[in-house]
Image (spheres, rainbow, N blue to C red):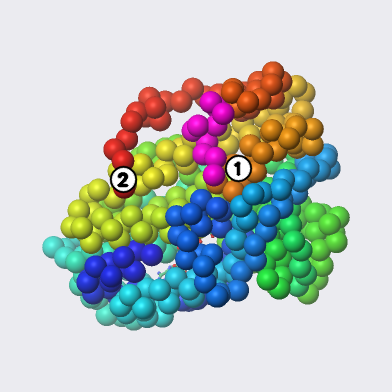
Amino acid sequence: MCGEQLARAGHKVNLFDEHLAWEKPCGGGLTHKAIQCFPFLLDNSYPKKLVNSVELISSEEHRATLDMPHPIVIYSRTVLNGMLLDRARDAGCNVQRSRVMGVDTTTAKPRYCVEGDWQEADFLVLAAGARNQLLPETRALQRDELEMTQGYFVPQTSDSITIKFLPHFEGYIWSFPRCDHLSVGICGSMATHTSNELRSHLHQFASAEKFATENAKFYSHVLPSPQVRTLSDRAVIGKNWAMCGDAAAWVDPLTGEGLFYAMRSGELLGRSIAEGCPELYPSRVRASFSLELEFAARIVRRFYRGSFLGCSVTTRMVQFLQRNAVFRQLLSDLFCGTQDYSSLKQRVLGHLGGTLSQFVTSVLNFEKPTPKLRRAVPAAD
Ligand SMILES: Cc1cc2nc3c(=O)[nH]c(=O)nc-3n(C[C@H](O)[C@H](O)[C@H](O)COP(=O)(O)OP(=O)(O)OC[C@H]3O[C@@H](n4cnc5c(N)ncnc54)[C@H](O)[C@@H]3O)c2cc1C
């Protein structure tokens, strides 16, 4: 996305990826928020699956179904990455399959090392994902800023997404249907859960839901799960370099959604560099989405670990979904990204009755919003 913006603006762009279009471990689900921002994600002939229904399962096996007015669009990552690389190439980027071995931003012009050769550039964009090792003037993500994920590409199909919560567990299990298979996986905080724990929960779920994992391809990867401090303090831009996507930890810590934030941050960075003012990038990201991620970072622990009226918050949520159509509407809007976190409270107070209103307020009011969140930010675009 970033390379495409820059090439369209007439810059010479060299884009390196060690795998190019590959099946990166991922659900591959894009919310309506992403489709609204990037309509080409829907209007194209690349294979994808549109899903309008989500089944939520509590840790005690209560079940509720959300019918979404706008579909979640699910891609295989080989297809999605391929489409984005095609767009970058068509815009004029030179796309090369190579591993970048190092970067050096201490010289007047920044340098990068590919296949043993050090090359100079005017600006370095680092979009190497959650495992990014290219860290000029910044630090790596720590364990409590990362989630572990494990999963299978299961040769089965379905027309519905499934989300399963677990007792005392910061994360969830998902099944995302694609055109010809399911991406079934689990994510959990790296600081509080072990990989054995994840694998055991995943196998239990797969066997209960009759997903055949014996011949399925296994995957595992890490996913950024930013804390408030990650979003407010970690440097993602410096002299002649900047990060976007997972490398910058721009993932919703509550849902694990990262594709939209990766694409949007790439677009905003590309535009800022093309205009000759990369320093505008952080404020544009802030105006576009990072306050939402901060909000999610504040409530995530309460959401997965908290209780309401003697039951876990996630169980109560599924129970309320079974009973209340207005709450179902609210959650479907949240799920497809048309309802943001920051204006949720007003909507809840206006439309939900006593207990439900208390429930949502108790989750959202876990900590009082900091002044930062209330401060008006300059509009990005
Ligand atoms: C299991 C799992 C499920 C997920 N499900 C969803 C979902 O359903 N919806 C959603 O919105 N988000 C989901 N996410 C998050 C989403 O995958 C990421 O947020 C998104 O891929 C971030 O994009 P990115 O381009 O920043 O990083 P990546 O997609 O990780 O891309 C980084 C690229 O950099 C390349 N690279 C790395 N190091 C180097 C190097 N040194 N030299 C050259 N190339 C290099 C890699 O080959 C890779 O192609 C999921 C994540 C995981 C792990």
- Check if residue 340 falls in the magenta segment: yes
Report crowding for label 1: few under 14, some 14 to 19, many 20 or more residues within 10 A (C-alpha): some
Q: Residue 223's x, y, as percent?
A: 54, 54
Residue 224 seen from this side = no
The answer to which image quadrant residue 133 occupies is: bottom left
Residue 156 falls left or right of residue 82: right
Q: Position of residue 252 (x, y in %)?
A: 52, 46
Distance from the alpha carbon under mark 1 to that under mark 2: 24 Å
Quadrant of the rendered structure where residue 51 is? bottom right
- Asked whether the viewer can see residue 261, the reply is yes
Q: Which residue is mark 2?
A: 380
Q: Compared with residue 210, is residue 343 higher up or lower down, i.e. above or below?
A: above
Q: Residue at x 79, y 36 (%)?
A: 322
> Depth check: 314 or 352 in front?
352
The residue beneath circle 1 is 333
Count residues near mark 2 (Cα–Cα under 10 Å), then give few for <14, some for 14-19, many for 20+. some
Estimate the x, y position of residue 140 in percent, counting from the top left: 41, 52
Asked if residue 71 lies in the magenta stretch, the reply is no
Evaluate if marks 1 and 2 touch, with contact meaning CB atoms under 8 Å apart.
no
**On screen, 10 above or below 256?**
below
Q: Secondary structure at mark 1?
A: helix
Q: Earlier in the sequence, mark 1 or mark 2?
A: 1
Q: Residue at x 40, y 73 (%)?
A: 87
Q: Where residue 31 sits in the image (x, y, percent)?
A: 56, 53
**Magenta part of the chain:** 338-347
User: Who is closer to the viewer here, 334 or 239?
Assistant: 334
Q: Amino acid at mark 1?
A: Asp
- Which residue is at a point 67% across and 29% down the rendered structure image? 306
Residue at horizontal 16 percent and vertical 65 percent from the top: 109
| Three-letter code for the amino acid on which mark 2 is drawn | Ala
